[in-house]
Image (spheres, helix red, strand yellow):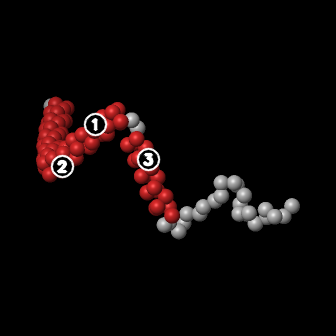
Amino acid sequence: EFAKAIEAKQVAYQEAERAKYVVLKAEQERKVERLSSHAIDQSMHHAEVVGPAAVIRAEGESEAAKLISDATKAAGPGLIELRRIEAAKEVATTMSTNRNVVYLPNSGNMLLGLNSGAN
């Protein structure tokens, strides 16, 4: 009888532990579901606030790319060349006003012609 009582106690303990596990698992699932639901709500709110503007901007950029593509097909690469020149001009302006830029001669003569008279 003593052995049966110990066995019954162990079975009851295991069942209680299993029940605790089921409860903890259910609580964890509810917590994950709440967090997931909250994240979805935030994402939807963000999409409602930012979404229309982003969609409109993307549509505008798409239309601009299409127009540039059509113009390039019709008139040649002149527009692209113009944009390249404008970008180079902007880079040159930025570099010319930057005090950290040093210009070196193309000749490779680092003495800047100081020794050109000496033979």
Q: Are marks 3 and 2 in contact (CB under 8 Å)?
A: no
Query: Is 56 above or below relative to 3?
Result: below
From the image, which quarter does the N terminus lie in? Answer: top left
Q: Which residue is mark 3?
A: 84
Q: Position of residue 3 (x, y in %)?
A: 19, 32
Tag 3: residue type? Arg
User: Horizontal and vertical percent for residue 88?
Assistant: 46, 52
Foreground: disc 3 or disc 2: 3
Question: Distance from label 2 to label 1 (Cα)?
Answer: 20 Å
- Is residue 24 visible in the rendered structure shown here? no
Residue pointed to by mark 1:
66
Q: Earlier in the sequence, mark 3 or mark 2?
A: 2
* Occupied quadrant, residue 115: bottom right
**Mark 1 closeness class: few <14, some 14–19, many ≥20 residues within 10 Å:** few
Front residue (pair 79, 95): 79
In this rendering, position of residue 43 left or right of residue 103: left
Q: Which residue is mark 2?
A: 53
